[in-house]
Image (cartoon, helix red, strand yellow):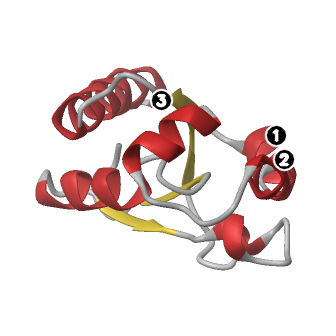
Amino acid sequence: MQQGTLIVVVGVCASGKTTLSSGLRQLGYNVCSVAQEHSVSGRLWERPKPDFLILLDCSFETVRERKRISWGIDRYHQQQALLQHARAHADLVVTTDGFSPEQLVEHVHEQLLQLGEMLS
């Protein structure tokens, strides 16, 4: 990835958006997360004008393991529906089930390095 490339991270609740964004920032990436799943717009992710879009996904069971939630599977499906446009345009989709925070950051960093080499 080139210096200054804006990476936007979206995903369902508790998929690791904040964790990944923080970890990538520490590695020198220009990254922000967008709470697309809580919006009413399927295109909220476009507002920051990303150069690269990462979509994080995880199962409903993983959401429940990672975060105390007061909502059920219907809200999870609504979040998935709101993310369909982003999923269709994502440059990288990562299913985060089974990743520790450190593993997620390392995995995505490796993917970005590989993609950066291919894009150069």
**Residue that numbered label 2 is attached to:** 84
Looking at the image, tell me whether mark 2 or mark 3 is earlier in sequence order.
Answer: 2
Asked if marks 1 and 2 touch (Cβ < 8 Å), the reply is yes
Kindly identify the residue that appears in the image at 82 percent across and 47 percent down: 77
Query: Does any portion of residue 99 appear in the rendered image?
Result: yes
Q: Which of the two discs, 3 and 1, sits closer to the camera?
A: 1
Looking at the image, tell me whether mark 3 or mark 1 is earlier in sequence order.
Answer: 1
**Residue that numbered label 1 is attached to:** 88
Which of the labelled discs sits on residue 69, or is there none?
Answer: none
Secondary element under disc 1, as helix, strand or loop, is: helix
Task: Work out how far the residue at label 3 is from the one at label 1, CA to CA, in angstroms.
Answer: 20 Å
Return the x and y of residue 59 as percentages of the image width and height.
61, 32
Q: Which amino acid does the dot numbered 3 rest on?
A: Leu
In the picture provided, is 92 more to the left or to the right than 114?
A: right
Kindly identify the residue that appears in the image at 16 percent across and 36 percent down: 102
**Residue that numbered label 3 is attached to:** 119
Return the x and y of residue 28 as percentages of the image width and height.
16, 57
Task: Work out how far the residue at label 2 is from the one at label 3, CA to CA, in angstroms.
Answer: 25 Å
Task: Work out how far the residue at label 1 is from the one at label 2, CA to CA, in angstroms.
Answer: 6 Å
